[in-house]
Amino acid sequence: MSFTVEERGNPNTLSYRLFFKNAEGKYISPFHDIPVYADESQNIFHMVVEVPRWTNAKMEIATKDFLNPIKQDVKKGKLRYVANVFPHKGYIWNYGAIPQTWEDPAHKDGDTSCCGDNDPIDVCEIGSKVCCRGEVIKVKILGILAMIDEGETDWKVIAINVEDPDAKEFNNIHDVQRLKPGYLEATVDWFKRYKVPDGKPENRFAFNEEFKDKDFAIEVIKSTHNFWKALISQQTNAGELNCPYCCSAEEAKTAVGELINGSTMRKNDPGMRKDSSVMGYLKIDIM
């Protein structure tokens, strides 16, 4: 299985989008169309990389936009960046999401007593490689952290790329503690303080800031996959989320062209280009 990503607009502008295509060249949604499992029998999952390690731009799958491209988060009309909170530089892992999962904002979690945050479940990939934005990798699940963000449950899965040279050594959260001492503590510290420079209070966590193990994490992922299935089958109210519907490849291509030409984007964005040209392509192969 292979995908390509198509970069449109200029990075660090409101117009920037990263669209996904399948092997046939048809536009797809990274939220809905990439399978949750890379190997279900081995509990290996796909991860869509939104933010490469050490970078600061807050990129995310645009769950409310047509085709759900990756774009930079915006608040009060301004692009969002995470601050360098000493001693950390940007994001300290490859950060992204597991496709075909959804943290239901109408479901109160029995462990956290808070509802979901309306997004795919987040992943912190701890391998040695700095991944590319839009890269789709296979990950082994190691554990999970339950962050409470402004009253919402915001799970953070800890995982490692199966192609990492040391992946065989990591099989549960205790291996991270043993082989990467201080990394889990740094992860809690990062999530606790990364919004403080924006004037917000520190985030808090369930389970006294403790990480739950691999089996617990996999059950959480499976439950968010079930919430996603309820979402796309219209058993749950989608609200403003853009969910898949049947459209032709030509209709999708036309819609992307309209987005880039500014019919539904900000026409005064300096990153907008009249020729709608593609800035670049990146082929991503998933075996």
Image: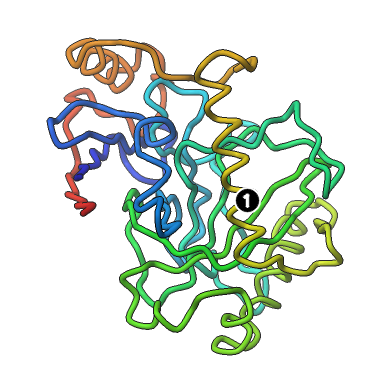
- The spot of residue 19 in percent (x, y) is 30, 34
Q: In what quadrant of the picture does the N terminus appear?
A: top left
Which of these two is toward me, 209 or 12? 209
Q: Name the residue under label 1.
A: 219
Q: Is residue 85 above or below residue 230?
A: below
Q: Is residue 42 above or below residue 35?
A: below
60 sits left or right of 22 in the view: right
Which of these two is toward me, 193 or 146? 146
Where residue 73 sits, quadrant-wise, is top right
- The spot of residue 132 in percent (x, y) is 32, 58
How busy is the neighbourhood of tag 1: few (under 14 within 10 Å), some, or many (20 plus)? few
Say what secondary structure mark 1 lies in. Answer: helix
- The spot of residue 200 in percent (x, y) is 81, 51
In this view, the residue farthest toward the front is 41
- Residue type at tag 1: Glu
Where residue 194 sits, quadrant-wise, is bottom right
Q: Which residue is drawn at 72% across and 37% down?
A: 116
Q: Which residue is drawn at 33% across and 38% down?
A: 18
Q: In this view, does 237 lie above or below 230?
A: above
Q: Residue at x 64, y 49 (%)?
A: 220
250 sits left or right of 145 in the view: left
Q: Residue at x 31, y 53 (%)?
A: 135
Where residue 214 sits, quadrant-wise, is bottom right
Q: In this view, does 267 lie above or below 44?
A: above
